[in-house]
Amino acid sequence: MLNPKPRIGVYICHCGVNISATVDVEAVAAFAAGLPGVIVARDYMYMCSDPGQALIRQDIEEHDLNRVVVASCSPRMHEPTFRGAAEKAGLNPYLVDMANIREQCAWVHVKGAETTGKAKTLVASAVARAALLEPLEAREVEVTPGTLVIGGGLAGMVAALDIADAGFPVTLVEQSDHLGGRVAELDSTYPSLESAAELLDPLIERVQSHPYIAVLLGSRVAKIEGYVGNFEVSVGKLGNWETGEGDRSTDLPIYQVGSIVVATGYDAFDPRRKPEYGYGQYPNVITTLEMERLLQAKSPVSNLQSLLPNPQSAIRSVAFIKCVGSRDAQVGNPYCSRVCCMVAAKQAHLVKDLLPETAVAVFYMDVRTSGKGGEEFYDEVRKKGVIYRRGNVSEIVRRGDRVALIAEDTLLGQPIEIEADLVVLAVGMEPRANADSIATLLKLPRSPDGFFLELHPKLRPVDTAVDGVFLAGCCQGPKDIPDTVAQAKAAASSALIPLLRGTVLAESATAVVEEELCAGCGMCVEVCPYGAPALHPLWGVSRINAVLCKGCGACASACPSKAIRLQHFTEEQVLAQIDALVGV
């Protein structure tokens, strides 16, 4: 019997006080007990806890339940938890449904009868759908043992080494002619002032000499097809790696890999977009990245003096301006870039070491000293005589051989004007200019700030919406070196999971085509963001690659002949939910 009479168990979660503070959960449970097909209805403090899951398993066995509805938090949080509990009791995991009465009810309404009433309606809707759920079978796909790492900076190299050290081949693609990324541009790192070269050079040597890592410099990923466990990647050789103009060839072999790590890094903010600072107009207004290169040179003092209108004059004062291109909604970057405060402190420290008699001032909105030793380093910099002024610099203008910073001291509430021989702009991080091309290749979503979007900010910070594709480093958002390394190692660990298992579970709630109804119009092919449907070359009807399909339903919605059915979200199930919501 394909569809036995529903025997449904309903479980209402208190979620501590997250739900019970505004929803009368006991009343909701009593209401659920009277719904059609419901055999047992209970409320419990934490349904996701081990005792809560044990309660579900026990009821499935004792009451012969064939459907389960849990009213709690978002399915994104705990649907796998409750599916697993049901499966342990012998129930198909796709016969479990959830009603989100936390985010969609308790957290958005005040305590009262109407809030409890809405929770009842949401539960009734889930019960109506659950009665029509059908069991689906889990499918496994074999995995190609290898990983593609896109980006040869710090994050890409760390991830590549961890995967290769586990015994799996890695192809590392870097568009420039060298490894190291942005860290290679640094003179030293904070708070220890350790040489960046001493940190990076051994890492580069390990990558280049590792027997399981193939490094492709001056290259770009040209095409990616396939799915988790079986990605097909083609790589093009850039004709001019500095400008990215054209491909010298696109006949590099196609790499088959099981997982992908994206570690494409960031771009530094271009302060020409803040013309009031005079960058590009006054040679003695530079960025922190340019300052790093000057500090790396054999004669850093001479290099700094060469920026002055009169290179023979002494540098009497240096001013740093923080948050240039960060925390600035006017340029579209409302976020904090996290490293600018400490980079400015580090460079102010180094300037004081080189030029002890030089006055050094740092203009700031706030001081954020994240990371181990950050606060102590900030204190040390101030003890060396660096002056921190809380102020907004509105403009930089020429004053003879010097420049003047016109600002407001936001502590005193007074306008000020400070002259300086050299101004250093602490520029923030932005998404790479070519982030669009990577997003298109991999179908990766991006957050409002333009960085690649993680699947969950707390629970899955390196995963993406595309199975088998993981994020490492500043392509996901601004980070310092320790956080970049930590995320790279996390991405490598996640990328290793399918390689070590040898198989991956494929989505079961996929779309299927009733071929006798299909007109072969190709509409599904056009709208699918994952490339799952394709027209059969001989029969002309649509067929869906179930491994590529993510069950989004775009094809089913677009099909004019209604030939596509989305499993687990059929029209009958959705209409039953709607009827329950409107009280039919």
Image (spheres, rainbow, N blue to C red):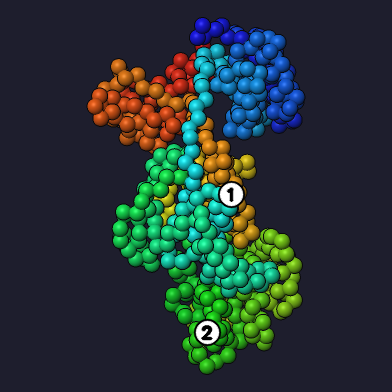
Name the foreground residue: 454 vs 239: 239
In front: 578, or 556? 556
Q: Give the farthest residue toward the bottom.
A: 312
Dot 1 or dot 2: first in sequence order is 1
Q: CA distance from mark 1 to mark 2?
A: 45 Å
Most extreme residue toward the front is 211
Q: Residue at x 51, y 11 (%)?
A: 584
Tag 2 secondary structure:
helix
Q: Tell me the kind of residue under disc 1.
A: Ala
**517 left or right of 449?**
left
As drawn, is 400 to the left or to the right of 417? Answer: left
Q: Which residue bears the numbered disc 1?
A: 166
Question: In this rendering, is residue 565 above or below 324?
Answer: above
Q: Locate residue 401, reporting x and y percent.
A: 51, 87
- The reply to whether residue 452 is visible in this rendering is no
Any mark on residue 512, and which?
Answer: none
| Mark 2, residue position | 303
Marks 1, 2: nearer the viewer: 1
Classify residue 140 as left or right of residue 246: right
